[in-house]
Image: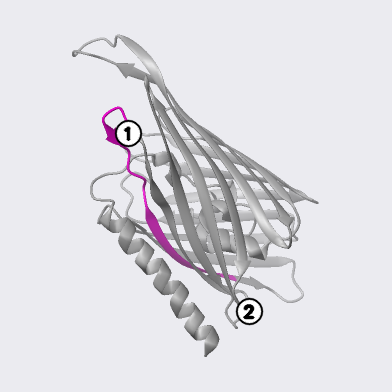
Amino acid sequence: MKQFKITKQILLLLLISAAVAYSQSAGNTGLSFLKYGFGARNIAMGDAGTALSNDITSLFYNPAKLTLTSGSEVLFMHNEWIQDVRSEVIGAKTIIFGLPFALGFNVTSVDGIEYREVPGEPITTFDANYFYGSLSTGFFVTDEISMGVTVKYLYEGILNDEAAGFGFDFGINYLLPIHGLTPSIVIKNIGSMNKLRNESTKLPTEVRIGVAYTYSLENSKFDFTGGVEFQKYLDTEDNHFNFGGEVLYNKLIALRAGYQSSFESRGFTTGIGLMWGSLKFDYAFLPFSLGMGSANLFSLQFKF
């Protein structure tokens, strides 16, 4: 009964936070680079990382799941997005005083943006640059329930204008009595930015609720993982469901696929993973419609 009361209080806290964020987020948001996933494994599985992240990438999706990791990890991801958007993302995690702590860094740039004062040929071109640095940790509230928090420093620079701000993520993860079944909930990007020239950019605050299930066949070298999550950006009326799955053979090679609903220009995702000891390489491929091209993402991870 005591555990049930704790769970209710935690969920109530998240719902209140979501309501506050919603009341502050009327209109459109910017800082779209905060919407990009972290780790090619998660992105290949429909970006359902709130449910499916199981390593250092939890720092981006749900810091509460850092409690399920052990040892130290580093991860580097290169993102060749569409429309000349590129990102370099780095994550590092270790255990300090029995708690997991993770640092994350994202540098995103958009090159060759044309500048015009009147219709016709551009006067010049310029770049847009974005950055965040984050610190995450998680801890167990009970034997089954863990909570996590992330604080982010944010920066954007467009032409001659610059702005900075802070954002916060809060997450919960629950280990159900059914082995391998894990639900999660997170609210991300609560915060604000300084003014960029005349107006402050609004953060893309979102809520994700997901569940993942992992199953290993007896007397077999195959492991199966699947998950689904509901994603809601609080400033818009559109909702998304992200689905993903993975087939892992002999802890050596993984095949992955996913689907993201209600996006105009994308849906299916796919990718592969290769493991060799403590080293892991992941690749994700996202085809876009409407003539926008495709995105290719690579990540390299080392655990020690």
Q: What element carries label 1?
A: strand
Q: Is mark 2 on a helix, strand or loop?
A: loop
- The correct choice, above or below, for 44 with respect to 86 in the image is below
**Residue at x 34%, y 44% (from the top left corner):** 265
Magenta part of the protein: which range?
196-213
Report whether 233 appears left or right of 258: left
Q: Could you classify mark 1 by the number of other residues whose Cα lies within 10 Å: few (under 14), some (14-19), or many (20 or more)?
A: some
Q: What residue type is labelled 2?
A: His
- The correct choice, above or below, for 161 with respect to 175 in the image is above
Instruction: Find the distance from the CA under tag 1 to the CA under tag 2.
Output: 48 Å
- Please provide percent x and percent y for residue 35: 43, 46
Q: Could you classify mark 2 by the number of other residues whose Cα lies within 10 Å: few (under 14), some (14-19), or many (20 or more)?
A: few
Of the residues under marks 1 and 2, which one precedes in the sequence? 2
**Residue at x 19%, y 14% (from the top left corner):** 119
Report whether 256 appears left or right of 280: left
Name the residue that disc number 2 marks.
Answer: 179
- The correct choice, above or below, for 228 with respect to 106 in the image is below
Name the residue that disc number 1 marks.
Answer: 195
